[in-house]
Amino acid sequence: MAVSDRTREQGPADGPTITPTDGELDPLDALLPAPRSPLRRLLIGCAVVGVVALLAWSWGFGLLRPRPECCGSGSASVTVTSDPSDPGAAMVSAHFFNSSAAELEITAADVELAGARVTKVEVSDITGHCEGAALPARVDAKESVSLLISFVPEVCTDSSQDWGEVHLDLSIPDRWWPTLDRTYTLPDPVVAGGEIATQTPLANACWVTNR
Amino acid sequence: MKANTETSPNSNPTEVSRTNGAAMTNEDHLHKGTPEATSPKAATSRLAEALSSTTARVASVGIATLLFSAALISAGDGAGGRPGTLVLAMLVTIALLAALSLLSILSGADATLTRDAARLSSEPLQQALLRRWISRARWVRNVGGMAGVFVWLFATNGQGDILIFGIGGIAVGAVAGEMHLARPSQGARSADLTVRSLSRYLGRREVAAGAVAGVACLVATGLALANGLGGRALIGSGGLGALAVVTLIGWRVALRRRPATTDSLRAADDLVRELAINHGLGAPGVSLAFALAGSALASMEPALGDSVAALSFICRVSAIAIWWFNRRLGLGRVERLRAR
């Protein structure tokens, strides 16, 4: 790169100017990279946006990670009925939706209900016409099941706090994914069939169990 | 190594427009010495600029035509016409226009590039450098912003906060755009030894905005932690992280090496660094910080009430306002820059 003093050559106001010679770096290139052609920018831009969009779609569609939804997160409301197999117990039914693109297995469920003793947790199909099946249970991709939580209310008066939490242990069968666990807050259940719309969860449970 | 230790008054980044003395020399250099002016790349760039403006006109005319078509269809409905085919044609036309517009953005076509550079400087060589930076900065921001919107659309099914994803994409693009390294010379190397620091380039307004955004993030994080809302605290602290990242990259831009060069190019380079730090990086970073603080505060509204909602609203409006005024790099304030 030739650094010349143009003051001597062209006049007093020009000052020193750098002019690239053959094979040397353009002075602008030394400060900022040369601009890419529009075609190259278009290709790079499309590639970047395309790859990001593909990854985002895979993420959103559940291809990159499991997307279980339960107990009110985008599913129907939680209902309480009497447990057909145990007249003294109430049963809460909550929807579990496998939003992933892969099959999920619910390996275990740990339910905590304030003021109640949980007796069993089962899974049935979404229609509720089939009997509940014990865990573990598999849920196909984009399919829903009902979590049936049977419990015996110990009191009929609720505290002001959230009344229930569901901890689910999940795994993806036949995949390298590690197991995962999710905790969901159980919303206040309504009495199935719309017989009454009262009060609090335990009061409703006591009502359906004739306490 | 050749060292240029001269400290010229022209090294002040705000005085680019005053360096008119070497106009003839630089113009001569631009047209004869710089390959950029005569290469096919330059020709395609000019074509892209022209296409950009043409695209805008075509889009306007297209939209007007579509509206007219819609009116005709409405009239045709009553007269037993066949709106199905027309509606299909309309949709195809709209899709083509949208695709053309997207491709135009992704190719970096910029109809106002030459004009914007000319507003910043009157010297051709300085304009060439400024055009490089403006074109690059706008392109990476557009690509980043578009990628962010796609993430919002596909990863959250459109249920996330588009402000965070859109502005976040712009900020990521802006950071990526400033990560380049100048090409080293093949032969003897030179360096400009002018002392530079981040504070030299930072604008007062940008510093003030960053400070306010930082306080907003601190408030959001503090409120979340005080109320046991750890997830919200993470969002608020994300805003602080965004500010830290753009400050770090801004520092890198300020100290990026510069070879010995003319006073004229040095002044233009200083202006490029100032624009990169304040408009290229700072504005998206501050806007993202406001958006994150607003999102964190909004999610605490059910627990903490209306006062938090008001704060969240202010943060969101600030984020949108900063994005809006900086969407074309905020070069509309060029007159003020020149006059300082």
Image (spheres, helix red, strand yellow):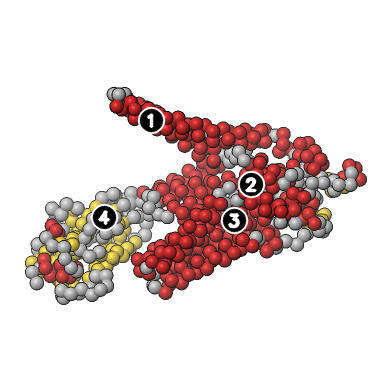
Q: Which residue is mark 4?
A: A75
Respond whether the residues carrying marks 1 and 3 are from the same subunit.
yes
Q: Residue at x 26, y 60 (%)?
A: A71
Position in image of residue A206 (x %, y %):
12, 70
Q: Chain of mark 4?
A: A
Q: Which residue is mark 1?
A: B71
Q: Which residue is mark 2?
A: B134
Amino acid type at mark 1: Ala
Q: Residues within 10 Å of mark 4 (few under 14, many from 20)?
A: some
Q: Residues within 10 Å of mark 3 (few under 14, many from 20)?
A: many
Q: Secondary structure at mark 3?
A: helix
Residue A177 is marked as: none
The reply to whether discs 3 and 4 touch (Cβ–Cβ < 8 Å) is no
Amino acid type at mark 2: Ile
Position in image of residue B51 (x %, y %):
58, 33
Residue B281 is marked as: 3
Q: Chain of mark 2?
A: B
Q: CA distance from mark 3 to mark 4?
A: 42 Å
Mark positioned earlier in the residue sequence (3 or 2): 2
Q: Would residue B110 be found to the left or right of residue A146 on screen?
A: right
Respond whether the residues carrying marks 4 and 1 are from the same subunit.
no
